[in-house]
Amino acid sequence: MDANDAPRGVILVGVQAGLPDAVLREAARLARELRLDLVCAHVDLERYTVGEHLDGSVLSRSIDPDLPDERVGAFDAALAAHIDEVLAGSGLTWTGRELAGDPGRALARLAEAVDARYIVVGTRDASVRETLREFFQGSVASHLAHRQHRPLLVVPLRPITADEPLPWE
């Protein structure tokens, strides 16, 4: 590989425990095809960002005032093990980033810091918790589509048939 072929940027994928593997596999496919590294980012909704480093890592605090800890979040070991399992044999290099706060904003800031070529997310889960979160905070994909400039790939997780109502109807 010469200097002109050197990978530039990364593929950034938003991950969380229980996320269907299809999102990670699609991000991995894109990273392989573009010969880019993969950055897997998890956003802790129970923390908020108090500082950011140049590499995109964040210093955060708990939203619970009884937990006054301030720390750089560590990527969840169980989630990392699952990512390793899904990506086994792919030949991809990946890194994990632990973020805090609003997922759309956190992913957009990290995308800028790591020069992401694409951001990959899945459609929302139909669970009550996710429906409520989306009602109050909005769709992560919608936020990313309207509030940052990088290409966004939204992986459909549970497509509906033409005669079923859309999730927001």
Image: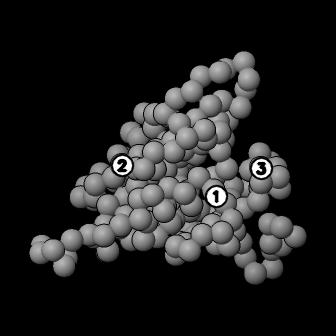
Q: Amino acid at mark 2?
A: Thr
- Asked if the residue at tag 1 contacts the one at tag 3, i.e. Cβ–Cβ closer than 8 Å, the answer is no
User: Which residue is rendered at x = 60% and y = 38% of the image?
Assistant: 50
- Judge left or right: residue 77 versus residue 58: left
Camera-nearest residue between 145 and 110: 110
Q: CA distance from mark 3 to mark 1?
A: 12 Å
Instruction: Categorize mark 1 by other alpha carbons within 10 Å: few (<14), some (14-19), many (20+).
Output: many
What colouring style does the render use? one colour
Q: Which residue appears at 15% of the width and 74% of the height?
A: 3
Foreground residue, 111 or 31? 111
Looking at the image, tell me whether mark 1 or mark 2 is earlier in sequence order: 2
Residue 147 vertical position relative to residue 55 in the rendered view, above or below: below
State which quadrant residue 115 falls in: bottom left
Q: Which residue is mark 2?
A: 95
Find numbered disc 1 in the image and state the secondary structure of the residue it sits on.
helix
Of residues 112 and 129, the one nearer the viewer is 112
Residue 37, numbered circle: none
Residue 31 appears in the picture as rendered: yes
Q: Amino acid at mark 3?
A: Arg
Please determine whether, in this image, residue 137 is positioned above or below residue 72: below
The spot of residue 56 in percent (x, y) is 46, 50
Residue 84's place in the image compared with 24, above or below, is above
Please tell me which residue is depicted at 19% across the width and 76% down the height of the picture.
Answer: 5
* Residue 27 seen in the current view: no
- Asked whether the beta carbons under mark 2 and mark 3 sit within 8 Å of each other, the answer is no
Task: State the mark number for residue 104.
Answer: 1
* Distance (Cα) linking label 1 and label 2: 19 Å
Identify residue for label 3: 133
Quarter placement of the N terminus: bottom left
Which is more N-terminal, label 1 or label 3? 1
Q: Amino acid at mark 1?
A: Gly
